[in-house]
Amino acid sequence: MTGNTGSVLIAIDEDAITSRCSGENVNSVGVCKFRRDTLGGGIALVSVGVAAAVTGAVLLVVRRRRRTGSASAGPPRLLVRQF
């Protein structure tokens, strides 16, 4: 979900804010001076989404490797160790 939101923010970066584009806010060629600045936030959200997906995939692989050698049955459990 984060990656989707981030990609939308990247896509709308530099779009004109149409509610503020009239009169003196538009130059002689019709370009509005008020534009969206969403690239940084979009990149950050896409990065968080990719990191979460990679972390989830790694955790699944590690868990599957651990379960293959054991004969335990029942619901999966989360093991927390303190060092």
Image (cartoon, rainbow, N blue to C red):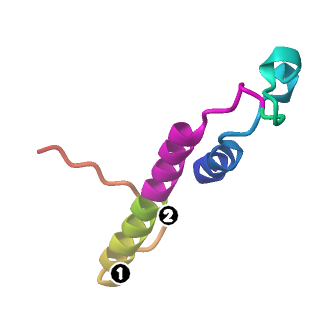
Q: Which mark is residue 35?
A: none
Residue 21, given in percent of the width and then of the height, sits at 84, 24
SS at circle 1: loop
Residue 48, percent across and down? 47, 48
> What residue type is disc 1 on?
Ala
Residue drawn where x is 42% and y is 64% of the image: 54
In magenta stretch: residue 73: no
Q: Which residues are magenta?
A: 32-52
Amino acid type, label 2: Pro
Q: Nearer the viewer, residue 2 or 33?
A: 33
Does residue 73 lie above or below 18 as drawn? below
Question: Residue drawn at (82%, 20%), measured in percent from left and top?
Answer: 20
Residue at the (48%, 58%) spot, across then down: 50
Q: Main secondary structure of the magenta part?
A: helix
Residue at image mark 2: 75
Alpha carbon separation for disc pair 1 and 2: 13 Å
Residue sitting at the far top? 24
Give left or right: position of 19 versus 58.
right
Sort mark 2 into few (<14), some (14-19) or many (20+) by Cα contacts within 10 Å.
few
Query: Would residue 58 appear left or right of 19 to someone viewing this image?
Result: left
Judging by the rendered image, the residue that carries numbered circle 1 is: 71
Indicate whether 35 appears above or below 50. Answer: above
The residue at the far left in this view is 83
